[in-house]
Image (cartoon, rainbow, N blue to C red):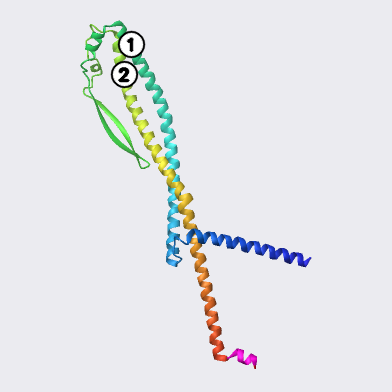
Amino acid sequence: MANATSEKSRSDLELARRDLNAERKEVIELASTQVTPTRMELTKQKRQLQTATRGHKLLKDKRDELMRQFMELVRENMELRKKVEAGIKSANTNFVIAKAGMSEEILNVALMAPKQEVYLEVSKKNVMSVDTPVFEYKTRTADSNDIYSYGFAFTSSDLDGAVKSLADILPDMLLLAEREKACQLMASEIEKTRRRVNALEHVIIPQAQTNIKYITMKLDENERSTQIRLMKVKDMMLEEAHHYKEKQQA
């Protein structure tokens, strides 16, 4: 029974030694060609690992917040798009009806020279380090009736409704363009942030951990080798001073 237990212990010890040697060989192969096993390099790698870990956490938080705001923008964008499409559809219907009740020459003359002018101003808003556009428009005059560039004597009321519907939908169209551009920019930033998070998580941090393990292993080996050399030197000095071997032989 004792022999079987002893044999099993030796087998387990041999397996553990093989696993340790395999892990040591893997670490050395991964890191030996990249770093120099010195204490200064060990301190540098530890500092790099600490910085990468902190940056990984910050980038993950940024990615999560960007995703939250992006989903809100997408929902708002979908509602705006439905509203704008409904407004444009209504305006097109009114234009078709107006064209059916008027001659093409009168319609072209009525819309030839617009009376109102629109000035668009573009600014930027920073959202999680993403510069999203902000559109603001101003009209040349404050009178809402200046959208009609024609007299009412020879035109139909359907044309008035079409022009009015287009004027009413203009703010929503600008807001839709603003939201869609913001979604596009935020999607690009999310993709870049995701790549950085993956690079830190799967490349930089594991590589720094492997380098630290390799340097620590090599420094421990050097320390053990130094201790062994010192012990041998001490034995040689004692032997030279006291001649232990000669006394034993005598």
**Residue 248 is inside the magenta segment:** yes
Q: Is residue 72 left or right of residue 230?
A: left
Quadrant in which the N terminus is drawn: bottom right
For residue 36, which numbered disc appears in the image?
Answer: none
Quadrant in which the C terminus is drawn: bottom right
Tell me where residue 140 appears, x and y as whole percent.
21, 23
Q: Which residues are magenta?
A: 243-249
Tell me where residue 207 appears, x and y as whole percent.
47, 56
Reading the image, the residue beneath label 2 is 166
For residue 96, which numbered disc appears in the image?
Answer: 1
Q: Tell me the residue at 50%/71% (across/down).
A: 222
Q: Tell me the residue at 53%/82% (across/down).
A: 233
Give the vertical position of 229 relative to 217 (above or below).
Answer: below
Find numbered disc 1 in the image and state the secondary structure of the residue it sits on: helix
Whether pointer 2 and pointer 1 mark residues with C-beta atoms closer than 8 Å, the reply is no
Tell me where residue 192 appears, x and y as whole percent.
40, 43
- Point out the tag, 2 or 1, that comes first from the N-terminus: 1
Q: Tell me the residue at 33%/11% (across/down).
A: 96
The amino acid type, in three-letter code, at marker 2 is: Leu
| Chief secondary structure of the magenta portion | helix
